[in-house]
Image (cartoon, rainbow, N blue to C red):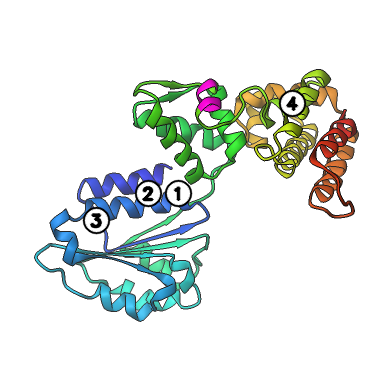
Amino acid sequence: MDEALQIVNDIRKGIIKPIYFLFGEEAYFIDKISDYIGNKILTEEEKGFNQMVLYGKDVSIEDIVGNAKRYPMMADRQVVIIKEAQHLSRSIERLTSYVENPQETTVLVICYKYKKLDKRKALYKAIKKGGVVFESKKLYENQVTEWLRKTLLSSGYSISHKAAILLVEFLGTDLSRINNELSKLKLVLPEKSEITPQDIEEHIGISKDYNNFELKKAIGERNVVKATKIITYFAQNPKNNPFVLTVTLLNSFFSQLLQYHGLTDHSPKSVASALRINPYFVGEFQTAARNYPMKKVSQIISYLRELDLKGKGVGATNVNQADLLKELLVKIL
């Protein structure tokens, strides 16, 4: 996050490099940086003749180099953005000779999503020497809530801790998807608002009381009544609460709980670091560890794998979600 912000700040200060190679698993930061370059380096009048967007599946390395070597028209620079450049993975190293001697009046942006650039090869070394190479890594769940808070703060909003966790639990770590939902909230909520679980329930459709976050908590506490209510709600609303997602999240929880049992240091800071979770959740793991010994946790993980296969139709036919959810609860509790 900080590195992406540094790139944007440098461009804002006029520190502009001839090559920006953006790669990695997290598409959100790649899109944000390339969009910023596309929006800010040239004026609207200059863009007509001096800015082009090409797609990796439609061009060759030679096409990219040919366009990058053009001179700008009535402007100091031209901007060439290559989207979906991962389609050029087999020939991407052929870009090396251009990178070693780039056109100084061209800003070439390569968006190489979901792929890695081999740091041992000449292309990576050449970009590092004269341009910017940025690896966009997936954020861990505990990092996403912090990103969420900072993103909202920069646009004049805030979010309660429970609301942030609710969003991440429901949407996962896909930053683009989370950002889309935040955009919806900003349209209906006044500026300087604090986003609450009630707002999320009303405008996004995630129940603040009946969700996987609350189910995980109830199971960890061995609160049978609450867990049963949530499971019943899931059975009545299967489209909004797919069984496979519930099993996946519970499997992740119990796998982390197994890891917790193996730790020698159970201090909150050590647990948060080892499990890569927000410190807010450490209490839940402490409670769950008291309720589920290591042997029981191993059994539950095995049950969850079996149920995951059943949910996908393996070894079971015509089993509805309600029955699977009841079986899940019985096996765990």
Helix, strand or loop at mark 4:
helix
Q: Is residue 201 magenta?
A: yes
Question: Of discs 1 and 3, which sits in the foreground?
Answer: 1
* Mark 4 neighbour density, 10 Å: few (under 14) some (14–19) many (20 or more): many
Q: How far separated are the C-alphas under marks 1 and 2?
A: 6 Å
Q: How far separated are the C-alphas under marks 1 and 3?
A: 21 Å
Residue 32 - label: 2
Which residue lies at the image location 33% right of the left edge and 49% below the top edge?
A: 7
Amino acid found under the numbered disc labelled 1: Tyr
Amino acid found under the numbered disc labelled 2: Lys
Which residue is identified by label 3?
16
Helix, strand or loop at mark 3:
loop
Query: Which is more N-terminal, label 3 or label 4?
Result: 3
Amino acid found under the numbered disc labelled 3: Ile
Residue 241: x and y, percent?
68, 37
Check contact, mark 1 vs mark 2: CB within 8 A: yes
Question: Of discs 3 and 2, which sits in the foreground?
Answer: 2
Residue 280: x and y, percent?
61, 24
Magenta range: 198-202
